[in-house]
Image (spheres, coloured by chain):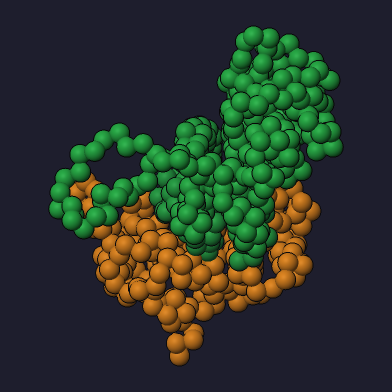
Amino acid sequence: MENTIALEARSIYKSFNDPVKIDVLKDVSFRVDRGEYASIIGRSGSGKSTLLYILSTMDTDFTGELLIDGIGVRDKTEKELAAIRNEKIGFVFQFHYLLNEFTALKNVMLPGFKLNKVSEEELEHNAYEYLKDLGIETLAKKMAYQLSGGEKQRVAIARAMINDPLIIMCDEPTGNLDSKNADIVFNIFKGLTETYNKTLLVVTHDLDFAKKTGRIIELHDGKVVSD
Amino acid sequence: MRLKHLSDIALALMLARWKQTLVAAIGVTFSIALFVTLLGFMEGLNKLLDGIVLNRTPHIRLYNDIQPSKLQPIDISKEFKNYHNFISSVKPGKKRREIYNAQPIINKLERDDRILGLAPKITDQVFYNLGNIDLNGVISGLEVEQEAKLFAFSDYIIEGKYQDLQTISNSIIIGQGVAEVINAKLGDVVTVTAAGGEQFPLKVIGFFESGITEIDKVQSFASLSTTRKLLGVSNNYISDIQIKLKDLNIAPTLAIEYEDLFSLDAEDIQTANAQFETGSGVRSIISYAVGITLLIVSGFGIYNILNMLIYEKMDTIAILKATGFAGSDVKKIFISISLSIGVAGAIGGIFFGLLMSLGIDAIPFSAPSLPTVDTYPIDYGIQYYSIAVLFAMLTTYLAGWLPAKKASRVDPVIIIRGK
């Protein structure tokens, strides 16, 4: 039973104390099953990004419970959380956040270096395969800063995939792209869920994009208003 | 996480800012080069200056001092035990300068394995006769080979061969200062009068310059047998036994031991030349302080550059953390950047330091009081190089540690949100 749940949030509260106490998230609870393609939508300031950072284990300053793959993240050390992020979570950000000092291929391989489960040759092969699936294998040897926005985003997706994570989280993945590239990215995500049976959780304010996903979680003023 | 991959990332970050990295490395190179040059030069000078006196000084000298007995009869007397002794200016009794039973003492000392070697010696007052004028002087009778071996006697002979003292009978080596005053040339015969009163013609076979003018003006050397003849004493007469130890530092304790064992006076090198030790010590401390300051300053350079790098690469750090790199991994990356700068700088520093030392070593330098020296002295001791490298590693590690700690604490959420 538990195996089918990728991620579960149990009554998560989060508030900022600077300068006055503002409750950003109030009693947020939901679960995401394996293979689901879910999106979180909401207006600016509804707390959707904050929620994503909590779900991604990067932000630990909250109350409530978060289980990833059935494991609670509450009392984990910084090092253990980093390991969880590395192994179980893949990230795609609005701003592509590639390391400009490396080639596209090296960027994809980076999380694999940390995980250190397969040999470097195998890792390179895997990275190349992912780039190929995303149709950008010809850019593998290019430095990250030489790529266009859409290309960067696809490299970032490949990077999110490299450790074969349990769940891929995306923060406004199309927010910085034109509609053509946004479509490409959407189709890639769709392909990921269909061919790789990946779990996807996408934060977006783009309603058109969200409507095409399998499930919409709507946040309003820090509360889940519809699911 | 493999080390190779960490260093890959570190290298990429360094190359992204290679100019600053190079400047930091040059800073380390410069300070290490100066450190080893400064220390080498200073210690070279120290050794040279100390050598003038210390090399020539026995570590322990056994002799009979002319002194009144420490225990006067009245002190021993039971009758006057509780009385105050006010007899002042007590004179010594008739006492010879000779060391009694010198041969058995020498035999015993030769079996002591703390001793590197020993040389018997006779020292006495003489007059150099210059027509009607008598000049004060001191003659030392030496066992020439031992003296040359243990106390670098040959270094100070500026003309003639010291071995001739042994082979030519009635020969003498006189100090440069003495030679000037009595106008003696090689092969001349000078007349020397012993304190006992006998006059003796001796052939000058060499000149000697110690570097200390006061000594050169009075001192002369002859073989043991010549000196005995001059003084009119028996042919086993010895006034001093000079001992060279394997370890100079045990001299004070050993001196006390020998004093008790042989009932002789013993003087150790530390007591005889305390001021030289102090002088070198202070000079060393000053040069170490200057050198270490240089290294610390270069450490600040690294600190600044790493801090800058971290501010510039916040995004990189955030993304590394978001994709699962722990704070400790980030810390390792930045510390390895710092250490690489340190290692590269140290290698360069050793190389340039050696070059600079060789350069100084080639500069001609001659002083009349330093007959054995013709260029500036440099001590190439490996210890200065190791200290420099060790300290450079330490400072670069510390200089890297603080920024690295900061980098490891970067909160990726703040950076990613901030965009």
Q: Position of residue B79 (x, y in %)?
A: 18, 56
Q: Split into 4 quadrants, where in the image is the C terminus of chain A?
A: bottom left
Q: Quadrant of residue B239?
A: top right
Work out whether residue B221 or residue B82 is closer to the camera in this orientation and state it: B82
Q: Residue at x 74, y 48 (%)?
A: A142
In the image, is residue A95 above or below residue B114?
Answer: above
Report the chain shown in orange.
A
Work out whether residue B205 or residue B4 is closer to the camera in this orientation and state it: B205
Q: Position of residue B300 (x, y in %)?
A: 49, 36
Q: Quadrant of residue B291?
A: top right
* Residue B105 appears anywhere in the view: yes
Q: Split into 4 quadrants, where in the image is the N terminus of chain A?
A: bottom left
Q: Position of residue A109 (x, y in %)?
A: 67, 61
Left or right: residue B84 compared with residue B406: left
Report the chain shown in green.
B
* Residue B340 appears anywhere in the view: no
Left or right: residue B146 compared with residue A150: right
In the image, is residue B107 above or below residue B248?
Answer: below
Q: Residue at x 75, y 23 (%)?
A: B201
In the image, is residue B283 above or below residue B338?
Answer: above
In the image, is residue B39 above or below residue B187?
Answer: below
